[in-house]
Image: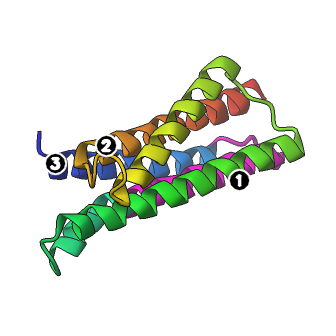
Amino acid sequence: MAPEDALASIAEVAIGLAGFSGLVAAFGQRSGQSWRGDQKARIIFLVALSFMVITTSLLPWAISGWTSSASLVWGIPMVTCGALTLTSLLVWIVLSRRHGYALQFPRTSISILSVSGALQIAVLLSGFGVILPHSSALFVLGLLSVLIFCANMFLALLHMTWRG
């Protein structure tokens, strides 16, 4: 599979994830109850990360219309994705610790967060040309790790909603 095809598939999955998050937000809450802070934060992060994945996965096509330089076509989206994802992961960690949000699946969540963080550092460094310069395969893996993180957060949201 060409990296471009994988990026299109990743964008489609991210669109679906954002859509399902919206459905959970619209229909998941029982009448007369309001969303708790941790549920609201998860929905916001899910939608924000989904749109970040959509945007950065489509950037190579947009940039390739202006230039054929691999360092720009792959470097700009990789640096953007790595920086935004690392920032989002750090904000999520700080926010969840500050407000005492419980991890729904602790071992799984910590493992996914660790792997995703490490992959985003590699994506960022690759985007700058430091390691595996402008590796489209690494970019795809980095985006997949964000989707896996989002899927885990979505499952946690469903778990919290169903549990009541």
Residue located 68% across and 49% down the image? 90
Q: Say above or below: 82 vs 64.
A: above
* Residue 31 place in picture, x, y as percent: 77, 45
Q: Secondary structure at mark 2?
A: helix
The residue carrying mark 3 is 5
Q: Earlier in the sequence, mark 1 or mark 2?
A: 1
Element at label 3: helix
- From the image, state whether disc 1 or disc 2 is nearer to you: 2
- Coloration mode: rainbow
Instruction: Kindly identify which numbered label has been placed on residue 91.
Output: 1
Which residue is drawn at the image coordinates 72% and 31% (left, top)? Answer: 160
Label at residue 138: 2
Mark closest to the chain's N terminus, 2 or 3: 3
Give amino acid for label 1.
Val
Image-based side of 48 in relation to 119, left or right? right
Query: Is disc 2 surrounded by few (<14), some (14 to 19) or many (20+) residues within 10 Å?
Result: many
